[in-house]
Amino acid sequence: MKLHEFQAKEMFAAYGIPTQKGLVIEDPAQVTRLSLKYPVVLKAQVLVGGRGKAGGIKLAATPDEARVRAAAILGMDIKGERVRRLLVAEAVDIGAEYYLAFIIDRTARRLTAIASAAGGIDIEEVARTSPEKITRQTVHPFVGFHAYHARKLGRSLGLTGTLLSDFGAVAGALSKLCIAEDAELAEINPLAVVGGRLLAVDAKVIIDDNAVFRHPALPPNEELTELERLARGAGLAYVELDGDIAVIGNGAGLVMSTLDVVAHFGGHPANFLDVGGGASTENMRQALAIVVRKPGVRALFINIFGGITRCDDIARGIVATPPPVGMVVRLVGTNEVEGRKILEAAGISAYRDPQEAAQAVVVLAASPSGQVGRVRK
């Protein structure tokens, strides 16, 4: 779950990490009523990178200029995201820029601190062109991240005196935030020298989706589409994609392989939907109702390999909620015979071979009407 910059900075403030003063607006007219010192910087609040290159970050020297800039940025489309809010913050004179982040390193299976004296630019670019400028330090789960770790990290960046002390405080606070808030990433880029002290000029926080339930005060997840939010409320794993073939399967691995085989035969999946192991008739009904709501869906592929999931339960869900588009079913596993009888009684045949089924659904989606009757074996 990604947080907007203003939300991440609110979290930073709660942990004592210094940021510049700023306020969020949704209407250009609000700019003139803000109690901020000029010049200010206006920053589009979207959950994608590259805001500056897209024109989503602008400076303004006066309230009138800020209002004009705000009107230009609000409503912009940045990498598919519409700008609905701006963070208006007091501009600062930056003396130097550093990078600091704590991230879950899945290879090391530990929290890892990453720091660089080459802040203010994409850390991926620094890693590619100047890897020697990046310092990494894994955090032992039983020892934790302490002041001496922070000082060692700060010294690797060439920091001394007050700046080293500031860095130690910021790094310590960021590590606490990352652990307490179940963050996969907590990043400051740049961590800037302003007036001889360190200031978090930008902020990025990504919370582990699996831990969101432990943090009821978190804002709603704005990454989710309407259908993704609906599916999550029903306990279904659903990710919306750009294609026209809806996909339902049981088990994340099976669904991922289903997307691959559909794409292999020239199809374009419209979604990922995993009804999960042990899926019930009701789970299947809900899944069907969700995937066909996506505009542009021309065909449906249901790929079930029953283990703890019973094929007869799946079949009852299919029959109870017939989709408005053509459908291909592959059904194998526990109670397969019973499941096939239920489908056949409703005029639906099911494949056993997943590749044959995938080819059939691709042909189905490409047909002029988007459907060629019920499934044929």
Image: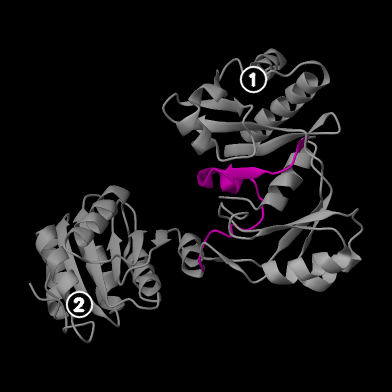
Q: Which of the 4 quarters of the picture holds residue 57?
A: bottom right
Q: Which of the 4 quarters of the picture holds residue 262?
A: bottom left
176 vs 65, nearest the viewer? 65
Q: Residues within 10 Å of mark 2 (few under 14, many from 20)?
A: some
Q: Is residue 24 visible?
A: yes
Mark 2 and mark 1: Cα distance apart in space: 56 Å
Residue 86's x, y, as percent? Answer: 72, 61
Which disc, if any, is residue 366?
2
Tell which tag, 2 or 1, sits nearer the viewer. 2
Residue 4's x, y, as percent? Answer: 65, 53
At x 13% / y 70%, what residue is drawn? 360
At x 73% / y 43%, what residue is drawn? 11
| Disc with the residue nearer the chain's start (2 vs 1) | 1
Name the amino acid type tagged 2: Ala
- Is 211 part of what is drawn in magenta? yes
Up the image or down, 124 lies above or below 43; here it is: above
Residue 170's x, y, as percent? Answer: 74, 29
At x 74% / y 40%, what residue is drawn? 12
**What residue is shown with label 1?**
145
2 vs 128, nearest the viewer? 128
* Secondary structure beneath label 1: loop
Q: Which of the 4 quarters of the picture holds residue 203?
A: top right
- Is 292 part of what is drawn in magenta? no
Magenta residue span: 199-225
